[in-house]
């Protein structure tokens, strides 16, 4: 994750970008071609079926265009692919950016601030603004990407301080979806849960490898269910999968190792599922009572703070510090493990 930025040194960070190549024209979106607007590269009108774009806003008028690059190129990483998200000057990017550059670029590690490795983006990449944390949505403050209010259940963030006022968002899609790795090493300390350490905006994150100091690979911590074919519907516990009963999230048969859950009582019958929040741990964990949440002590499972209105508990004595939790059953009793032996 990005270390705190000393802006007096920012010029050093920007030197490679300020020297961006200027001899290759950029795609201009949207552009006008044969009485139609195009917002992305197209094969229309190309006899070889190649992707192309206009380099002015009106191809019919100017006749200026180019083939679209389909891979990253140049930069000081020799065209290595983009890594999303990446941190740059304390901001979190899920898209390419033109910040301090005349061409869209991206970091090729999880932190430009730390590694200073970058490439120019392919013309197929989206260019946008960084996430703004914390942001307001439905009069509540959020310090990480959320799935609430998303039609497809995928996480998103606002690019302004108040989404309720501006309505501008981007999707929080990782270029290499992997789960949090606990414990992970960061600045010679080990973390067993998501952390805000090293951020300038109170953003929760985790490493996706055992050693962030060495690998610079990380992800935002999502605090709600997301994605899957249920579009981020809440978990249903217990649920049946392959005729076994599960009382909590599982990584069974998930190729990236991420935790998931059924969103109905039986995955075997309905096949509906979602990825679990990153704070949720699997069955070999138990609630810790009492635990502290927002300065208040709880001696049993609670719905407090759950926008899903589901019972949950902390897995450490202080949720405010560790952010480790799991669901309880619908009566507010801690969910038992499927195998206690």
Image: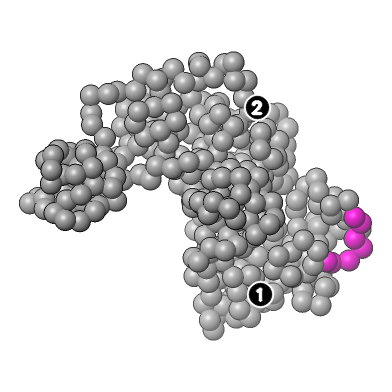
| Residue 50 appears left or right of 29 | left
Q: Which of marks 2 and 1 is in front?
A: 2
Q: Does the magenta stretch include residue 201?
A: no
| Residue 285 appears left or right of 14 | right
**Residue 283 numbered tag:** none
Question: Would you say the residues marked 2 and 1 are in contact, meaning their CB atoms lie under 8 Å apart?
Answer: no
Residue closer to the observer: 46 or 210:
46
Residue 206 appearing in the image: no
Quadrant position of residue 21 = top left
SS state under label 1 = loop
SS state under label 2 = loop
Residue closer to the observer: 143 or 83:
143
Which residue is depicted at the point 13% across and 54% down?
34
Q: Pointer 2: residues within 10 angstroms few (<14), some, or many (20+)?
A: some
Which residue is depicted at the point 84% across and 54% down?
293
At which x and y percent is residue 147?
58, 60
At which x and y percent is residue 254?
53, 61
Quadrant position of residue 106 = top left
Q: Pointer 1: residues within 10 angstroms few (<14), some, or many (20+)?
A: many
Residue closer to the observer: 27 or 191:
27
**Residue 4 numbered tag:** 2
| Residue 134 appears left or right of 321 | left
**Residue 236 numbered tag:** 1
Magenta residues span 296-302
């Amino acid at each position: 994750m990005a270390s705190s930025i000393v802006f007096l040194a920012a010029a050093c960070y920007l030197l490679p970008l300020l020297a961006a190549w200027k001899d290759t024209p950029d795609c201009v979106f949207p552009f006008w071609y044969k009485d139609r607007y195009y917002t992305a590269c197209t094969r229309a009108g190309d006899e070889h079926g190649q992707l192309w774009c206009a380099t002015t806003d009106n191809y019919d008028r100017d006749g200026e265009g180019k083939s679209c690059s389909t891979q990253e190129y140049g930069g000081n990483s020799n065209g290595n692919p983009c890594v999303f998200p990446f941190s740059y000057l304390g901001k979190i990017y899920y898209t390419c950016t033109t910040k301090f550059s005349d061409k869209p670029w991206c970091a090729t590690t999880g932190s430009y601030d730390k590694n200073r490795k970058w490439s120019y983006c392919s013309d197929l990449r989206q260019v946008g603004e960084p996430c703004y944390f914390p942001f307001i949505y439905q009069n509540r403050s959020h310090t990480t990407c959320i799935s609430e209010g998303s039609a497809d259940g995928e996480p998103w963030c606002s690019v302004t301080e108040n989404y309720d006022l501006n309505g501008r968002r981007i999707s929080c899609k990782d270029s290499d979806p992997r789960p949090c790795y606990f414990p992970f090493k960061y600045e010679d300390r080990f973390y067993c849960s998501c952390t805000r350490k090293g951020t300038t905006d109170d953003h929760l994150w985790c490493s996706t490898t055992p050693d962030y100091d060495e690998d610079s690979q990380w992800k935002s911590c999502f605090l709600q269910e997301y994605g899957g074919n249920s579009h981020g519907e809440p978990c249903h516990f217990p649920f049946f999968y392959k005729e076994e009963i599960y009382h909590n999230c599982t990584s069974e048969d998930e190729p990236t190792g991420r935790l998931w859950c059924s969103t109905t009582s039986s995955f075997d019958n309905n096949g509906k599922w979602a990825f679990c929040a990153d704070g949720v741990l699997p069955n070999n964990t138990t609630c810790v009572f009492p635990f502290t949440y927002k300065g208040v002590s709880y001696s049993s499972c609670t719905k407090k703070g759950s926008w899903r209105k589901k019972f949950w508990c902390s897995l450490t004595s202080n949720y405010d510090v560790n952010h480790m939790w799991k669901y309880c059953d619908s009566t507010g009793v801690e969910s038992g493990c499927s195998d206690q032996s």
